[in-house]
Every structure is written in structure tokens, then in C-alpha cells.
Image (tube, rainbow, N blue to C red):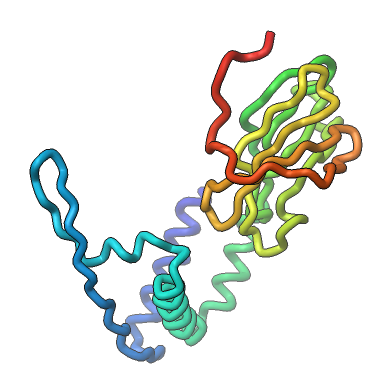
Amino acid sequence: MITNRFLFAIGAIVVTTALGLPTVEPAPGTPKKPVSTKYQGVTVEDPYQWLEKDDEPDVKAWSDTQNQRTRQYLDQLPERAAIEKQLTEWYAKTSPSYSSLVSRPGLLFVMKFQPPKQQPLLVTLTSAEDLKSEKVVLDPNVLDAKGATAIDWFVPSLDGKFVAVSLSKGGSEDGTLQFYETATGKAPQDTIAHVPEKVSGPKPT
């Protein structure tokens, strides 16, 4: 099972670490900036609440420092390259999965997750029994090679000729709405920023 393989890989990293080969600088201190918040009459003080504002320069600097230190440590593990190669090969062999199916006349809109791609893509099928009919409408992995852009949600038009897609970056869920032509995957220049995380309201009939 893939789970056992990942456990094996993690175990290999732990064993390698136990040998004491990698060295890394001590973790930098994290400043305390106490913030008091009252919940139902009870005051709670959180000295690290400032870290929740991930758009602030000081939070980004703190996060970058932590990431650099972690990368420095991981890159020194002698077996890391071999483990990464093996995990990548296993991950790439994972069968694709489908979700969020929406039916329109003659078409099925569906999200497809296909490792090793980092983000699911939006595709259409003429039938759930004919996977060879798959056609890609939007692949966020092509839009962003780093895999930081994701599809939050999508809503096809009633005739299926167009589809509204909310895209966000870095897990922010701060979506930007675009409208794509289903047949070509082309999108007009107009966009709508800061759309809600979910679409609510009556379903089309």
C-alpha cells in the first residue's frame, strides 16, 4: 500500500537523522506580541496571534527564515535524493481520482486529481463510462508551475458552453472569478476579484 511506502520513507529519514550527520543552526526566536481577546466574558491572551496575519512583512520574514532552516536541514540528509526519487515514482503511479461532478446537456464537468500534478484540474467527459472522452478545460498546474494556484469551485452555464471558475493562490481561498469557454479553454480578460469561498443559492433546473 502507498501508506506503508510513505511510512517506510519517513522511517528512513528518521534513521538517517539519528546518525547525527546533518547539522543546522538553532531555531531563531519567535517574538511574543501579546493580544488579548474576550470570548464570552473570558479574556484569552495569545502572544503568537500576530503570526496569523500571513500577508504582513514580519510574518513573511519569520516564515521564510523557518523554511530556509528546514530546507538547510533536509538538503543535508544523505538519503534524501534517493527517497525523493522513490516517492515521486510511487506517487506518479497513483490512479487518478474524480470529484465534484456536474451534469450539463451532453457533458459532465468534473475535477480530476492526477499525481504527480499538485493541483486538480477541470475536465469534461461525454460519459462517466468513457474516460477517453476527457477534455481539459482548465489546468491550474499550467497556469502556475509551482502548484500554488488552485481551483476553489466552478459552475457551468446551463447549456455547458461556458464555466465560471474561482482561482486562488497559496491556499488563501481569496478567489478571482474567470469565465472560460468550455470548448476552447479560453478566458476573457475580465475577472472578478475577492469572490466568496462557495457559491450559494438555488440550483439550476
The residue lying furthest to the right in this view is: 184
Query: In the orientation shown, which residue stands out farthest toward the top?
Result: 205
Query: Residue 161: horizontal and vertical position, in percent?
Result: 85, 26
Answer above or below: position of 169 versus 190.
Answer: below
In the drawing, does residue 93 fall left or right of residue 202? right
Give x and y (percent) for residue 150.
63, 49
Q: Measured from the top left, where is residue 71 in percent x and y?
A: 48, 80
* Residue under the image location 55 percent in, 71 percent down: 83
Tell me: 188 left or right of 173: right
Residue 8 position by quadrant: bottom left
Q: x, y percentage for residue 68? A: 47, 81
Q: Is residue 64 above or below residue 53?
A: below
Query: Which of these two is toward me, 117 or 38?
Result: 38
Residue under the image location 67 percent in, 13 percent down: 204
20 sits left or right of 105 in the view = left
Furthest-left residue in this view: 42
Tag count in the figure? 0
Asked where in the image residue 40 lies, by quadrant, the reply is top left
Instruction: Name the residue nearer the viewer: 122 or 30.
Output: 30
Q: Which image quarter: residue 41?
A: top left
Query: Which residue: 90% across, 38% down?
Result: 184
Q: Is residue 24 visible?
A: yes
Q: Nearer the viewer, residue 82 or 105?
A: 105
Asked whether the viewer can see residue 13, the reply is: no
Please tell me which residue is depicted at 67% across the width and 36% down the height of the picture.
111
Q: Is residue 73 left or right of residue 2?
A: left
Residue 190 versus residue 108 in the image, above or below: below
